[in-house]
Amino acid sequence: MVRSPRTRAWRTASLLLATVALAGIVGARPWWLRGVPANGQDFLPPDAAFRVSAQLDGKRVTVRWDIAHGYYLYRNKIHVAAESPDLIVEPLTLPPGALLTDRYFGPQEVYYRRVEGHAAYTRLDFGAHPMQIKLTYQGCAEAGLCYPPIVKVIYPTEMPAAASPVAAPGTQAEWFLILAALAGFLAAGLALRRGRALPSPGL
Amino acid sequence: MNRGLLAVIAVVAAAGWYGAHQLVSQGNPRGASGIRVAVGETSPPSAADAIPTPVPGALPAPRIPERIPPFTLPDLSGRPTAISAYDGRSLIINFWATWCAPCRREIPLLKTVDAAWKDRRFQVLGIAVDRRAQVASFAQKLRISYPLLAGQQDALDVAAAFGVATPAFPFTVFTDAHRRIVALYLGELHRPQINLILGVVQRVNDGHLGLPQARHAIDAGLAQLQAESAAG
C-alpha cells in the first residue's frame, strides 16, 4: 500500500506524541522525591489527593471532594465562606463521616473516596460580580502524611443544562419581562385610543 | 375603564412582577452562565476553562540541596538558633506540626532514637511549623527531650529551602556529620525505616560508604521494607 508523504508525517507525529506521553507517565514520580534518596511512598500532591469542584443548584451551592484512594479528609476541618462581594453563604451541611480513632487525637469523623456538602447562598449584588467561594479543608494520607489546611477560592459552575429540562430561571424571567413589555404596549395603545375613532388614511 | 383593559393591566403586572422577582432572586445575569470551575485561580475563567485534572508528578520539581541550607529559627524560648550550632553532628531534622496525627505518633520513636544515638554524635532536632506557645505546651505535655525550633512562615521557608516547597508533614532529613543530606523521608517514620537509615548514615560517617552508595543502599532497603510490609 502506498502512503502519501502527508500520511507518513501524521503517523510519525502521532508516534512521537505517544512516546512523549508514555515517557511522562512512566517517569512520573512525586515531585518531592525526584533525584533524592528517600522513601518509595508515592504521596500525591494535595490537589491530586483532594480534587474539589462546586456547582450551583438553585439557591444552594454543592461542593464535592473526590478523594484519592488511601487519603481522607477531616469533617471538622471543612469550611465554606463567601469570597465575592455581597454574597452570603450559610455553613456547609455535610453527611456523617466514617469514624477514625487516633491514638492521640481520639475519634475523628473523616471522609474517604467522595463527599458532597451543600450550603444555601444569597447574592445581593444582582450578579454584578462573578460568584466566588472560599473553601478550607484538611486531610491526610493513611500511610502517615498530613497536608496543612488547604484554602481555595473557586468559581462554582452552573448546573449542566441536561440536568434541568426546563429553561434556566434567568431565561424564563427574561421571557416574562418581554411579555409584560408587549402587553404594556398593547394596554397603553388601547387606553389612548379609547373613545376615539381611527383617523382615515385620507386616500 | 372597560374589563378588557383591566384584564390586560393585571396580566402586565403579574408578568412584570414574576420576571423581576426571578431576576433578583437568582442574581443570574446572562454573562454568568456557562462558567466552569477553575480551582485555585484568582481571575474569572473563560467559558473554555475546564475542571483541571491534576497529574501526580506534574508539579515543578524542587531542588533538594546537597547540604543543609543555612538558617536560623527561634527555639521555644524565642532565642534565635542557627543550624550551624549543631555542626559536627549527624542531624535527624524532623519537620512536624501539632495538628498532624502521624507527626505526633512518631515523637516517642524520635525520643528513643535521640537517647540511643546521642553518644554516636547523632542529634534529633524538631522543627515545628506552628505557633511557638502551642508547640511549647505540646512539648511539655509529651515530654519531648530533644531540641525544638518553631516558626510559621519562617519555618515554611526553611522547609522550602530543603526542597519541600508545598509542605506536607511529617518529613525528616538525615544528614551525615559533614552537613551533607543523605536522605529525606516523607511521612511517618517507623522503627525499621529509621534504623535502616541511621545504620547507613553511620557507615558514611565511618568512611565505609560514599554518598552515592549510601543513597542507593537506603533506596534499596526502603523498597525491601515496603515490599515486606505489603506482603504482610
Image (tube, coloured by chain):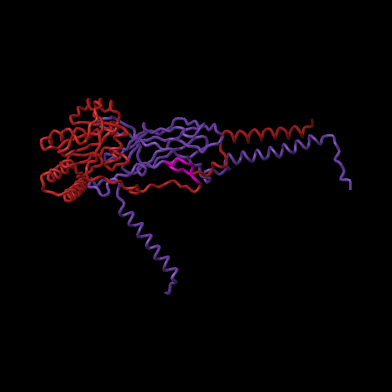
Chain colours: A purple, B red
The question of residue A120 being in magenta is answered with: no
Task: Please tell me which residue lies in front, B3 or A142.
Answer: A142
Q: Is residue A60 left or right of residue B153?
A: right
What residue is rendered at 17% in x and 37% in y? B87
Q: State the image quarter where residue A9 is shown.
A: bottom left
Task: Please tell me which residue lies in front, A61 or B124.
Answer: B124
Q: Residue furthest bottom?
A: A1
- In the rendered view of the protein, which quadrant contains the N terminus of chain A? bottom left
Residue A199 visible: yes
Task: Please tell me which residue lies in front, A129 or B151.
Answer: B151
Q: State the image quarter where residue A79 is shown.
A: top left
Looking at the picture, how far across and down is residue A179, in whole percent? Answer: 68, 39
Reply above or below: B47 against B95. below
Q: State the image quarter where residue B8 is shown.
A: top right
Looking at the picture, how far across and down is residue B157, in whole percent? Answer: 30, 37
- Count the marks: 0
What residue is rendered at 43% in x and 42% in y? B39
What residue is rendered at 64% in x and 41% in y? A175
Q: Is residue A114 left or right of residue B46?
A: left
Residue B109 visible: no
Looking at the picture, how far across and down is residue B199, in whole percent? Answer: 13, 43
The question of residue B37 being in magenta is answered with: yes
Assign the magenta stretch its main secondary structure: loop
Q: Is residue B202 left or right of residue A88?
A: left
Range of residues picked out in magenta: B36-46
Looking at the picture, how far across and down is residue B204, in whole percent? Answer: 13, 46
